[in-house]
Amino acid sequence: MKEIQGLFHLDSAPISIEIVDGRISNIIRKDKLTDSEHANFFIAPGFIDNQVNGYMGVDFSSPALTVEDVKKVTQLLWKVGVTTYLPTIVTSPHERFMENFAVLADATHDPDIALSVPGFHLEGPFISPEDGYRGAHNKDWVRLPDWEEFLKINNTAENKIIQVTLAPELDRAIDFIQKCVAQRIVVGIAHHNASAEQIKKAVGSGATISVHLGNGCANFIHRHENPLWPQLAEDRLMASIIVDSFHLRPDEVKTFFRAKGVDRLIITSDVTKLSGMPPGEYTWNEMTVVMTPEGMIKYPAQNVLAIASLPITRGIFNIMKFTKCTLAEAIQMATTNPARLYGLNDRGEIEVGKRADLVLFSIGESDLVIHKTFLAGKEVYSGEKGIG
């Protein structure tokens, strides 16, 4: 049996968590912590990031992806408390999808990677070709929903694509959504210019999440007829948001939080290979993007923001700062809510019987500071020891 102590993220009370065979066997309330090393650390479920395009020099959509690349990203994400994530491949040529999803599938044969990667996220290529709504996706590779193509891609992914994100206004999109739902694949909507009626139809067909809501949108929109209001008003839609202070301003985050409520928001990072890289001009998805010293990534050709560079810890910190929500609520949006969306019933909460995916952290001046990460009870990162 292993014991881990910390301050419970739900109420800051001292607790001891007992672990047997990688699962939580007991949670004991204590008057004080006997482990002085953890006396000032909060303990929470490991974070779940549903949109990771890559990290620290690795891009899941780039040519020549390797299993070692996937392992590298997985281990680096442990350092920021992420114990579960969805590798995300964005709009690409068909051949790239076939090659890279095969690599991702092969990587999940590694037991440690398999624990952290329950499946994959396909964002595009079935999105709006319109400037602005397309965002930084390469227009040359955008296309209409094609179920036969998707089946081929998912087959090479060993049927591990668990989310598809598309534009609901496209021809054949509704039929595509229904077929995904029949196979228990989560459908997200994003990079679209759908009307309120088209959004309602997509949700009625089984779409369940607005992906990085507020982004993948044109800079200038009609004040009434635009994709934002119907998604905010649709109670059946969860929404993921990038809370890096660039993709959404504080007032927007506060408004989205009030509209959706803590139970229907998911904090995501949308990070890619530029995380941790110095400011400058880079090639991403065969397009030129620019990263500022603050970590903002711009796509100058369309005058829109591109992918993100800051990990999910920053989003957790920022949502507390912007909305004044509690630590417990912020953690819920990065753990319990995504676990519920994907049916990951073995994680996302600190409860007896759940997998012991845990993170010990403190709250710094502008971010969470991760001290230890545990995956199925095994220490995989320590701030002192490095990656385990």
Image: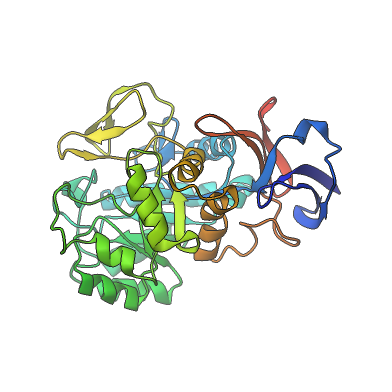
Q: For residue 171, what is the image quadrant?
A: bottom left
Residue appearing at x 25%, y 67% in the figure: 168
Give the percent coordinates (x, y) of residue 132. 17, 48
Q: Where 123 sits versus 273, above or below?
A: below
Q: Is residue 275 left or right of residue 109?
A: left
Q: Nearer the viewer, residue 196 or 98?
A: 196
Residue 303 lies, in percent from the top left, at 17, 38
User: Against 94, is 279 above or below?
Assistant: above
Which residue is rendered at x = 51% and y = 58% of the image? 338
Residue occupying image coordinates x 33% and y 45%: 248
Q: Residue at x 22, y 59 (%)?
A: 192
Instruction: Judge by depth and name the residue closer to the eye, 188 or 147.
Output: 188
In the rendered view of the protein, which quadrant contains the C terminus?
A: top right
Look at the image and tell me whether residue 154 can be seen: no
Q: Is residue 46 left or right of residue 14?
A: left
Type of colouring: rainbow
Quarter residue 205 falls in: bottom left
Above or below 72: residue 172: below
Residue, far front: 324
Total numbered circles: 0
Residue 372 seen in render: yes
x then y, percent, for residue 148: 29, 68
User: Quick check: 336 above or below 52?
Assistant: below
Q: Position of residue 140 (x, y in %)?
A: 16, 47
Query: In which image quadrant can residue 296 be found?
Result: top left
For this rendering, which residue is in front, 102 or 77? 77
